[in-house]
Image (cartoon, grey):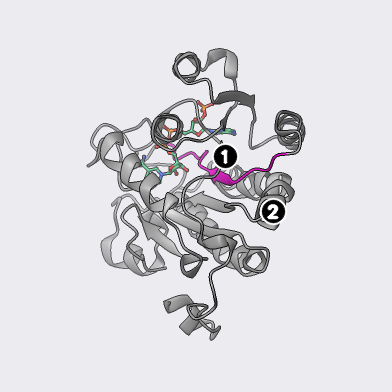
Amino acid sequence: TIFSKILNCPDKKNEKNSVADINGFGNNVLITGANRGLGLNMVEEIAKNYGVKRIFACCRDPDKAKDLVSLNLKYKVIHLIKLDVQNDKSIEVAAEEVKKILVNENLNVLINNAGIFEDTFGERTGGSFYFPQRDYWARHFDINVNGLAMVTAAFLPLLQQSAKAGERALLINMSSTLASISLGRIADFLKNGNVAYSMTKAAVNSYTHLVSKYLEKDGIITTCFCPGWVKTDLGTEVAELTVDQSIPPLMKTISNLKKEQNGNYMNRFDLYLFL
Ligand code: NDP
């Protein structure tokens, strides 16, 4: 892969198959930001089509997560878990709750999906190069980057256990094409100089690639994805794709991930993106 060339690490193609070559989502999946948008649709798609035993659908306020509660009535595999990625105590309590439900089972897939992008097209957005607001940058980094790292660390032992037991073990981080440093310079996607969100997602890419090196030896596959520009609250109504055009192919690609793709930054069709 291009990563192995850049970092001068050997490709692992010739190694004999290992546990990381198993397909699918395994038995137990956890998704953050699962009450609306892409996260909610991931829950539905996995519940419907991937025969999993449990989906831990995490959100800040399960009592107000109406759509998730309706899904829960339809698919018994869904467990609603309270989790605010900005709050360490909340992450710790959520991890304990998941462990209790799993008893001796393992977590096979962790999808770090929760994220924010405020005032996407605003002319004087606080995320911009021209009118930066410290609290805008702090909030975006705290949720999109710091929160993701804290959640990963809290659930990592359960993923490691899974790989050790010879089961599927995936760490998936939601990124964006806006994270691409090379493409960003060419395209100037937003025309308003909003650089903060792009920087948070570039940090997610960096995190993904760095930790993939550590986790490779445990048998965990770590990747990050752009789902496409999708009509959600975050993507806005003018986005190109519906969730039905984004999530089914993305989930299929995730279910087919191979260890050769460890550390990669991809689109929903498995196409390698440039950093
Ligand atoms: P939405 O705005 O529709 O949903 C965001 C989700 O993140 C909500 O469930 C929200 O919960 C949750 N969230 C926000 N802050 C926190 C927090 N502190 N703790 C826990 N959950 C939180 O966004 P999308 O579904 O569109 O985006 C999902 C992911 O995909 C994001 O990481 C985004 O950056 C990425 N992405 C999206 C694209 C798009 O076009 N839509 C394009 C590229 C990437 P709550 O309801 O409580 O606010």
| Foreground pick, 116 / 166 | 166
Write the start and end of the magenta stretch as one range.
Answer: 105-118
Please say if 77 is above or below 246.
Answer: above
| Foreground pick, 207 / 93 | 93
Query: Which residue appears at 39% of the width and 35% of the height?
Result: 49
Query: Is residue 121 at all visible to an observer of this figure?
Result: no
Reading the image, the residue beneath label 1 is 27
Query: Which residue appears at 66% of the width and 37% of the height?
Result: 86
Label 2, residues with CA under 10 Å away: few <14, some 14-19, many ≥20: few
Residue type highlighted by circle 2: Ala
Q: Tell me if 134 is positioned left or right of 117 in this view.
A: right
Please say if 30 is above or below 71.
Answer: below
Label 1, residues with CA under 10 Å away: few <14, some 14-19, many ≥20: some
Residue type highlighted by circle 1: Asn
Residue 119 covered by magenta stretch:
no
Please give the label number shown on residue 125: none
Task: Please identify the quarter of the rendering in which residue 101 is found.
Answer: top right
Task: Please identify the quarter of the rendering in which residue 251 is found.
Answer: top left
Residue 198 place in picture, x, y as percent: 44, 54
Which quadrant is home to the N terminus? bottom left
Residue 108 covered by magenta stretch:
yes
Reading the image, the residue beneath label 2 is 165
Query: Which residue appears at 27% of the width and 61% of the height?
Result: 187
